[in-house]
């Protein structure tokens, strides 16, 4: 079934939040396509594949001090989750876009942070935390001076 709903009728938003309750990543891997990609304002380029995407998402979840989903909408195969958060001493907001394929597996996760200085700071922190286990060129090397 498409349109962001699982056969059980659970909303795509709740299904997405549920994947973070399983730190092993097994729930995530069961709900994403084999070629899932992660893109967004905090990334220099897309991250592809369930293991690498999960590693980046788990790390990013640990950076937030607080995140609250404020609005959601589903149109066809896409679900849009608007949120407000605090992380690294900064207030930020953004939208997460989840795109599913014909099998109702997430094939694209796009996370867009704002404002830009917060997005860049978030990316720098991701790079710092993942430099030993992921290609650091997925992330920006340093924040803009003065922010």
Image (cartoon, helix red, strand yellow):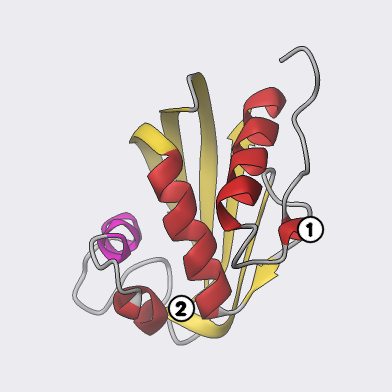
Occupied quadrant, residue 14:
bottom left
Residue numbers of the magenta segment:
12-20
Extreme residue toward the left, this view: 8
Point out the tag, 1 or 2, that comes first from the N-terminus.
2
**Image quarter of the C terminus:** top right
Which residue lies at the image location 19% right of the left edge and 76% below the top edge? 8
Residue 34 vertical position relative to residue 37 in the rendered view, above or below: below
Using the image, tell me which numbered label, if any, was put on residue 65: none
Of residues 113 and 82, the one nearer the viewer is 113
Occupied quadrant, residue 108:
bottom right
Using the image, tell me which numbered label, if any, was put on residue 32: 2
Which residue lies at the image location 75% right of the left edge and 29% below the top edge? 143
Using the image, tell me which numbered label, if any, was put on residue 137: 1
Residue 115 visible at all: no
Spot occupied by residue 18 in the image (x, y as percentages of width and height): 25, 62
Which residue lies at the image location 52% right of the left edge and 78% below the top edge? 50
Spot occupied by residue 72 in the image (x, y as percentages of width and height): 39, 44
Alpha carbon distance from label 1 to label 2: 24 Å
Residue 84 vertical position relative to residue 45 in the rendered view, above or below: above
Does residue 40 appear left or right of residue 13 in this picture?
right
**Magenta-drawn stretch contains 13:** yes
Please tell me whether mark 1 sits on a helix, a strand or a loop: helix
Please tell me whether mark 2 sits on a helix, a strand or a loop: strand
**Magenta-drawn stretch contains 4:** no
**Image quarter of the N terminus:** bottom left
Occupied quadrant, residue 133:
bottom right
> Mark 2 Cα within 10 Å, few/some/many (few <14, many 20+)?
many
In the rendered structure, are the residues bearing label 1 and label 2 in contact, judged by CB atoms less than 8 Å apart? no
Q: Main secondary structure of the magenta part?
A: helix
Which residue lies at the image location 67% right of the left edge and 40% below the top edge? 124
Spot occupied by residue 46 in the image (x, y as percentages of width and height): 72, 64
């Amino acid at each position: 079934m498409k349109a962001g709903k699982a056969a059980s009728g659970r909303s795509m938003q709740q299904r997405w939040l549920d994947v973070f309750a399983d730190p092993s990543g097994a729930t995530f891997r069961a709900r994403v396509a084999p070629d899932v990609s992660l893109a967004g304002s905090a990334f220099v380029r897309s991250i592809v594949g369930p293991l690498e995407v999960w590693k980046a998402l788990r790390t990013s979840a640990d950076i937030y001090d607080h995140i609250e989903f404020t609005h959601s909408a589903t149109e066809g195969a896409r679900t849009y989750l608007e949120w407000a958060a605090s992380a690294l001493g900064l207030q930020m907001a953004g939208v997460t876009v989840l795109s599913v394929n014909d099998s109702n597996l997430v094939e694209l996760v796009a996370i867009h942070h704002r404002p830009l200085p917060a997005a860049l700071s978030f990316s720098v922190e991701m790079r710092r935390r993942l430099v030993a286990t992921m290609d650091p060129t997925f992330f920006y090397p340093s924040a803009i001076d003065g922010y």
